[in-house]
Amino acid sequence: MGAKIGVLVANDHALFREMLCLILHQKKSIKIVGEAVNGLQAIDVISNLKPDVVLLDISMPNMDVIKVITQIREKSPKTKVLVFSKDPEETIIFKALKAGAKGYLCKDLSINDLIKAIQVVHNGELWIERKMMARFFEREAIANSKAEETTTNQDEVLTPREKEVLSCLAKGYSNKEIANALFISEKTVKSHMNNIFRKLKVSRRIEAILYAINRKIR
């Protein structure tokens, strides 16, 4: 088995936080490396511990979720952020995703889904319900369509296979699902993804998906 995924839990409700840490501590693939009770403490602890994944409650006190996520990305670029909330507002969730969060969790999700979400974002993929993902990208595509288009047609630099990978990505496929759909290995998918990111001059899956939607590569 590979190295454990270092997880930090940031939540101001002591009972929920302690129960979550206790449950995750029992999983062989996960190691709890720290806790935080508000946004300011989360930034400080993450800066020192550099966890692989942080579970961030977006309703904690002393926290502007966008500023916190932005600072986490600045101070610990490799840390993946999963946001969660009991009563989510889509607008806040969408802002968190644009700021760099890798996914959103409902507080009523199962333990198995929580573990899977941690593993998925740790691998650099997104974790978000597909219906919510569709609404998010539709909203962003409309906003981006109003912006001035660049004169460079970057579609031309993508190979046919890279366009197929990008098309699958825009449909919400994980790396494993892309590999199965195109009959290639996950390692090959990651190689194509790296090339796509480099050619499109993007650094996140969300940016690549928005590009695909705006260019109707689906």
Image (cartoon, grey):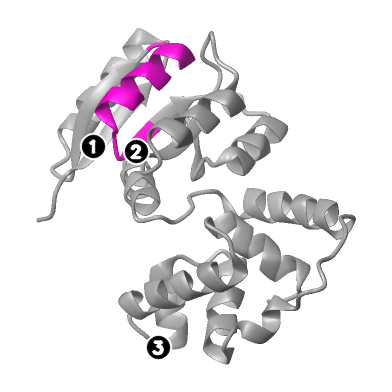
Left or right, 102 with reference to 13: right
Q: Earlier in the sequence, mark 2 or mark 1?
A: 1
Q: Is residue 53 left or right of residue 39?
A: left
- Which quadrant, please, contains the C terminus? bottom right
User: Does residue 173 appear in this view?
Assistant: yes
In the picture shown, does residue 160 fall above or below 110? below
Residue found at x 15% / y 33%: 26
> Residue 55 location, x and y as percent?
40, 31
Decide: few, some or many residues near mark 2? Use Cα within 10 Å; few <14, some 14-19, many ≥20: many
Q: According to the image, label 1 marks what residue?
A: 6
Are the residues flagged by discs 1 and 3 in contact, CB closer than 8 Å? no
Residue labelled with disc 3: 183
Dot 3 alpha-carbon crowd within 10 angstroms: few under 14, some 14 to 19, many 20 or more:
few
Q: Position of residue 174 (x, y in %)?
A: 45, 65
Q: Which residues are magenta?
A: 37-54
Question: Where does label 2 land, which residue?
Answer: 53
Residue 14 among those drawn in magenta:
no
What is the x, y in percent for residue 34?
Answer: 25, 22
Q: Nearer the viewer, mark 1 or mark 3?
A: 1
- Distance between the alpha carbons at the discs numbered 2 and 3: 30 Å
The correct choice, above or below, for 167 with respect to 207 in the image is below
Q: Amino acid at mark 3?
A: Phe
* Residue 109 seen in the figure: no
Residue sitting at x 44%, y 70%:
194
In terms of image quadrants, where is residue 168?
Answer: bottom right
In the depicted structure, whether residue 166 falls above or below residue 57: below
Tell me which amino acid carries mark 2: Val
**Vertically, is 218 above or below 48?**
below
